[in-house]
């Protein structure tokens, strides 16, 4: 992740990338990871005023968590 973003904690990085750099980062990560053992999630949080979460998963399969309301 060196050169793509800022380390936040453990294996969490914050990156501000244009489309070309994001695709380059994903391609390089995909070449490095072991698909049976590793799992990389790329979360596109979008602009703060239009949050539509987009998740890209590299490596192991990933199922998005279904969000539901819980009334207590």
Image (tube, rainbow, N blue to C red):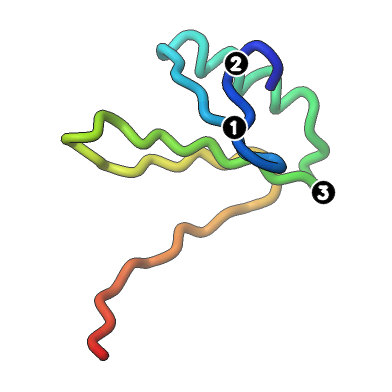
- Residue 52 or residue 3, whichever sits in front: 3
Q: Residues within 10 Å of mark 2 (few under 14, many from 20)?
A: some
Query: Measured from the top left, where is residue 48 in percent x and y?
Result: 24, 34
Give the side of residue 20 with respect to residue 33, left or right.
Answer: left
Residue at which label 2 appears: 4
Viewer-side label of 3, 1: 1
Give the side of residue 60 with respect to residue 65, left or right.
Answer: right
Work out which residue is located at the far bottom of the displayed protein and give it: 72
Q: Are marks 1 and 2 in contact (CB under 8 Å)?
A: yes
Secondary structure beneath label 3: loop
Q: How many labels sit on residues? A: 3
- Residue 42 or residue 49, whichever sits in front: 49
Query: Measured from the top left, where is residue 55 in percent x and y?
Result: 45, 42
Residue 39's place in the image compared with 65, above or below, is above
Query: Measured from the top left, where is residue 61 in percent x and y?
Result: 63, 52
Q: Residues within 10 Å of mark 1 (few under 14, many from 20)?
A: some
Q: Residue at x 69, y 40 (%)?
A: 11
Residue at which label 3 appears: 37
Secondary structure beneath label 1: strand
> In the rendered view of the protein, which quadrant contains the C terminus?
bottom left
Residue 16's place in the image compared with 65, above or below, is above
Q: Residue at x 40, y 34 (%)?
A: 44
- How far separated are the C-alphas under marks 3 and 1? 20 Å
Q: Residues within 10 Å of mark 3 (few under 14, many from 20)?
A: few
Query: Measured from the top left, where is residue 2 in percent x and y?
Result: 70, 16
- How far separated are the C-alphas under marks 2 and 3? 23 Å
Q: Which quadrant of the view contains residue 19?
A: top left
Work out which residue is located at the far front of the displayed protein and give it: 8
Secondary structure beneath label 2: loop
Residue at which label 1 appears: 13
- How far separated are the C-alphas under marks 1 and 2? 9 Å
Earlier in the chain: of badge 2 and badge 3, it is 2
């Amino acid at each position: 992740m060196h050169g793509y973003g800022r380390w936040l904690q453990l294996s969490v990085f914050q990156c501000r990338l244009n489309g070309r750099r994001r695709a380059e980062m994903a391609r390089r990560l995909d070449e490095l990871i072991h698909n049976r053992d590793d799992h990389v999630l790329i979360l596109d949080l979008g602009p703060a005023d239009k949050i539509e979460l987009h998740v890209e998963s590299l490596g192991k399969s990933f199922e998005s968590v279904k969000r539901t309301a819980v009334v207590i």
